[in-house]
Image (cartoon, helix red, strand yellow):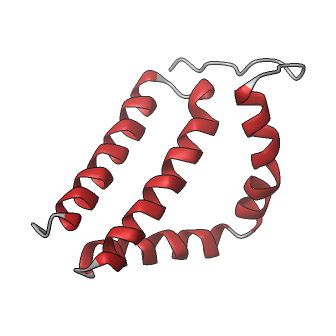
Amino acid sequence: METREPPGPGTEGFRAAVERRSAPAVVLLHRRRTLFLIAVLVLLCVGLFVANWLGVAALLVLIAITTWLAYLNWPRLTTGARIGRVLAFAVLAAFAVSHALGRF
């Protein structure tokens, strides 16, 4: 399996700024892994089973979290892992759109 190395520590630009600003949140999520997993599962259940604006909002929050984490991990991901992240985003987005249109 191939892995990609992220840019070095002196990197500047948008990605470096996002990584710096995300570091405290990532450390907190790492320390509270169980709580984070429960929160993600609650958002997913609310998004799938609540048939109003609250379900759509829960899915949008979940999309934002997964997109943020995928962006942070993208340089180190293999091609297969990248495809998995894109598919997860697409499935969540499809559920959110179908929920918003009242077809789910």
Percent across and percent down for residue 35 are 63, 76
Q: Is residue 98 above or below residue 15?
A: below
Q: At 26% across and 80% down in the image, what residue appears? A: 52
Q: Nearer the viewer, residue 49 or 53?
A: 53
Q: Is residue 34 above or below residue 70?
A: below
Q: Nearer the viewer, residue 26 or 80?
A: 26
Q: Nearer the viewer, residue 71 or 36?
A: 71
Which quadrant of the structure image shows residue 98? bottom left
Q: At 44% across and 30% down in the image, what residue appears? A: 82
Q: Is residue 69 above or below residue 101?
A: above
Percent across and percent down for residue 103 are 9, 66
Percent across and percent down for residue 18 are 73, 38
**Would residue 38 appear left or right of 33 to someone viewing this image?**
left
Percent across and percent down for residue 71 are 57, 37
User: Furthest-right residue in view?
Assistant: 10
Q: How many marks?
A: 0
**Would residue 76 appear left or right of 7 to someone viewing this image?**
left
User: Furthest-left residue in view?
Assistant: 103
- Image quadrant holding the C terminus, namely bottom left
Q: At 35% across and 47% down in the image, what residue appears? A: 88
Q: At 44% across and 33% down in the image, what residue appears? A: 81
Which quadrant of the structure image shows residue 14? top right
**Would residue 69 appear left or right of 56 to someone viewing this image?**
right
Q: Nearer the viewer, residue 12 or 35?
A: 12
Which quadrant of the structure image shows residue 55? bottom left
